[in-house]
Amino acid sequence: MGTADDSGRERPIVIVGASLGGAKAAEALREAGYEGRIVLIGDEHERPYERPPLSKGYLLGKTSREKIYVHPPQWYGEHDVTLRLGTAVAAIDPAGHTVTLADDGRIEYAKLLLTTGSLPRRLPVPGADQEGVLYLRRVEDSDRIKDALRPGARVAVIGAGWIGLETAAAARTAGAEVTILEAAELPLLRVLGREVAQVFADLHRDHGVDLRFNVQVDELTGEGGTVTGVRLGDGTTVPADAVIVGIGIAPDIALAKAAGLEIVNGIKTDEHLRTSAPDVYAAGDVANAYHPLFGRHLRVEHWANAVNQPQTAARAMLGHPDAVYDRVPYFFTDQYDLGMEYVGYVEPGGYDRVVFRGDPATREFIAFWLSDGRVLAGMNVNIWDVTEPIRELVRSGRKVDPARLADPGVPLGEV
Ligand SMILES: Cc1cc2nc3c(=O)[nH]c(=O)nc-3n(C[C@H](O)[C@H](O)[C@H](O)COP(=O)(O)OP(=O)(O)OC[C@H]3O[C@@H](n4cnc5c(N)ncnc54)[C@H](O)[C@@H]3O)c2cc1C
Ligand SMILES: NC(=O)c1ccc[n+]([C@@H]2O[C@H](COP(=O)([O-])OP(=O)(O)OC[C@H]3O[C@@H](n4cnc5c(N)ncnc54)[C@H](O)[C@@H]3O)[C@@H](O)[C@H]2O)c1
């Protein structure tokens, strides 16, 4: 494969997906000293922006629009990054090293990075396509939800995951009446387990949310094409002026799958973020990357992963053999006056003990998930500047004394 395209120009590095991961990859390529062409292609019309504010500060009207972007508008020109917005990539051809745009344009690439992210799962019940049924992924979705969060409005939230809980908190803060409808027994159960999930259930109950668990959503009722409520499996109907759906995402593998890349719970990559196709890499929500620390593939649907993985992908694309992604996963949330950070990874049900440092009822504590005496993950709630020692505990994989772990008098580095 030559390095020039049909017109004799050097082939660029092409990045598909102009969001957090894509923009961070372009930045990392320049920081690593790459001086060649970079083409960053995205089907959204906004320049790359961050999604966390869309369910928090931006939704609450506290964070301005200008604050959500990854870079100021002039950054792309200043760093010679060709940003093609409102442009969908229709196909990739790994053998021919080309991407085909939806408008039929073609770009030959030297290396290709896929940061196509994920798409919200749609609610598969009658009535789910009516006016007033709201999903949250893009900034315009957040604008629509903000319009619906009026004092006294009845808002039903389907799914007590991150989207459901954060939008419920914003809705209550805006004065809406909120009912959360969750299929499982507790919120965030798969990620946090019963002990810590209960903290979030209590938090929302204390803020006046009507929480309903173990429910089955059968239908969204409506009138004249506008949603009026949620009919449940037990025959009851929860009346609603707006319904927010946050029932998980699916990695956006469409391009990769059609191109014959190996797909296993996202685009499968090695620890260098290389896919099964030569010169094609993947990062962010869409990548199911081999993680050397955990000895398994891991797909992480969180902000820090979309910030950090592109740095490894960029260096790997530039030929650095030591570019390996082995960071311990990290994420955060803000709901009402609860702020937390989580570092580590626990498979659903994959722990045998939770140790609390501090009383969870005070909402100022650290929770640790252990297996066989080793810390798999830790979560600090309304306690700050402890991520690094917790990360170190997880990374070291050493056995700890649970009594010392629980004792606030023992520095985390000395547990
Ligand atoms: C409302 C919200 C709040 C969140 N809050 C938090 C939080 O508090 N903490 C946290 O850790 N994480 C949070 N997350 C998760 C975090 O935002 C994601 O993990 C992150 O956005 C992933 O970035 P990404 O670049 O991999 O993918 P995405 O952000 O999904 O971006 C992918 C981009 O690729 C584009 N694209 C896809 N296919 C094509 C194509 N064929 N052609 C052109 N463009 C294409 C998409 O339109 C999109 O713009 C939140 C997510 C949401 C939606
Ligand atoms: N603070 C954060 O880290 C943060 C914030 C917002 C969004 N995100 C990311 O955005 C993505 C989407 O978030 P999400 O909350 O939609 O997904 P999620 O996977 O966190 O939660 C989905 C919830 O919906 C429930 N559910 C599924 N089907 C249901 C049904 N038919 N009826 C009722 N409940 C049902 C699940 O049991 C689960 O509790 C995720 O990747 C998430 O990591 C992260």
Image (spheres, helix red, strand yellow):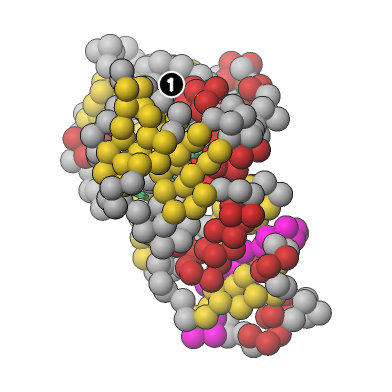
How far across and down, in percent of the image, does residue 369 sit? 54, 73
Q: Is residue 89 left or right of residue 410?
A: left
| Image quadrant occupied by the N terminus | top left
In this rendered view, identify the residue nearer to me: 64 or 166.
166
How far across and down, in percent of the image, does residue 262 sit? 23, 48
**Residue 300 showing in the rendered view:** no
Label 1 residue SS: loop
Q: Which residues are magenta?
A: 372-387
| Image quadrant occupied by the C terminus | bottom right
Whether residue 28 is situated above or below residue 385 in the rendered picture: above
Whether residue 269 is situated above or below residue 9 in the rendered picture: below
How far across and down, in percent of the image, does residue 387 sit? 67, 61
How far across and down, in percent of the image, does residue 28 sit? 56, 37
| Mark 1 lies within 8 Å of ligand 1 (Cβ measured) | yes
Q: Residue at x 29, y 52 (%)?
A: 234
User: Disc 1 residue type?
Assistant: Glu
Corner quadrant of residue 285: top left
In this view, the residue farthest toward the front is 236
Q: Is residue 223 magenta?
A: no
Residue carrying label 1:
44
Q: Residue at x 68, y 80 (%)?
A: 405
